[in-house]
Amino acid sequence: MGCGKPCTSSWITAMGAAFHPSCFKCPTCAGPISGGFFPFNNCAFCTEECMSRYQEPDFVIGEPDEALAAKAAEKAAEESAAEPQEICGAGAGEGMGCGGDLAASRIGALGAKFCPECFKCPTCGTQIEGSFYSHADCAFDTPECIEKYKFDHMSEEEKAALPRCGEGAGEGMGCGEMIRDGNSVGALGAKFCPECFKCPTCQKKIEGSFYGHADCAFDTPECIQIYVDEHGYER
């Protein structure tokens, strides 16, 4: 019984020993044992017939009985056809799981099951081995991954309706890019990416009060004067 090699990941424990799932086979017919079995001489047999054949003098250990092996293969095929196959990621959100048959070892999350190597963030592809951020029946590595996923799954009409950073504010305010994640600063009748809400003169990030002029936010009155001199706007 068994291949004799170390069990390092998943295994089956039986008769006081550990077996790789693929190695836990009947020594008479070489058929896989997936349920109950008949124990004899520290071996597991799939049927009483196999156990009896093992004890016969002409049986050679290591050489499966061909007739019984054919029966075992037929039985396994019938059981496989009767049982619905479990699919990796079935029931989870778009981009989760490989969509193939589940491995013997699996992870349960999000109301679905996954091959361990397939439980990944659908945005960045990082394999998730601990806690994660959940959205739309998917597991994400970071909140930023969620926001990118949301944007990638928007329709063109929804993307077109997104506000642009600094749209409606004065010259030099904002980057003009779409604000994708909803995290924004509202000021001057416009919205800004938090990192883009800066004084257009000195480029200092504004995090509190500011001096307003010409629909712009300035860090100091001196910044306003420089802006006026450069752009021709009066105070």
Image (cartoon, rainbow, N blue to C red):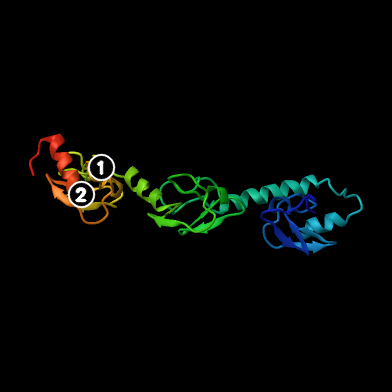
Q: Residues within 10 Å of mark 1 (few under 14, many from 20)?
A: some
Check the image and report above or below for 156 versus 127.
above
**Relative to the observer, which residue lies in front, 21 or 184?**
184
- Is residue 170 among what the camera can see? no
The residues tagged by marks 2 and 1 sit, at their Cα atoms, a distance apart of 9 Å
Q: Which of 195/82 is in front?
A: 195
Taking the view exactly as shown, the residue that stands out farthest to the left is: 234
Residue depicted at x 25% and y 40%: 175
Question: On the rendered image, what quadrant is the N terminus found in?
Answer: bottom right
Q: Is residue 58 visible?
A: yes
Relative to 22, 119 lies left or right: left
Pointer 2: what residue? Answer: 220
Residue drawn where x is 49% and y is 59% of the image: 131
Where is residue 187? Give x, y as percent.
Answer: 18, 52
Disc 2 element: loop
The amino acid pointed to by label 1 is: Cys
Horizontal and vertical percent position of residue 104: 62, 53
- The image position of residue 167, as x and y in percent, is 18, 43
- Which residue is more in the foreground, 121 or 73? 121
Quadrant of the snapshot with the C terminus: top left
Outermost residue toward the front in this view = 222
Residue 145 as seen in the image, left or right of residue 100: left
In the picture, measured across the screen, residue 128 lies left or right of residue 207, that is right
Q: Please, which residue is most extreme toward the right here?
A: 57
Query: Helix or strand or loop: what does disc 1 sit on?
Result: loop
| Residue position marked by numbered label 1 in the rendering | 202
Residue 67: give its label.
none
In this view, the residue in front, 32 or 229, is: 229
State yes or no: discs 2 and 1 in contact (Cβ < 8 Å): yes
Instruction: Please name the residue shown 76% across and 49% down the image.
Output: 30
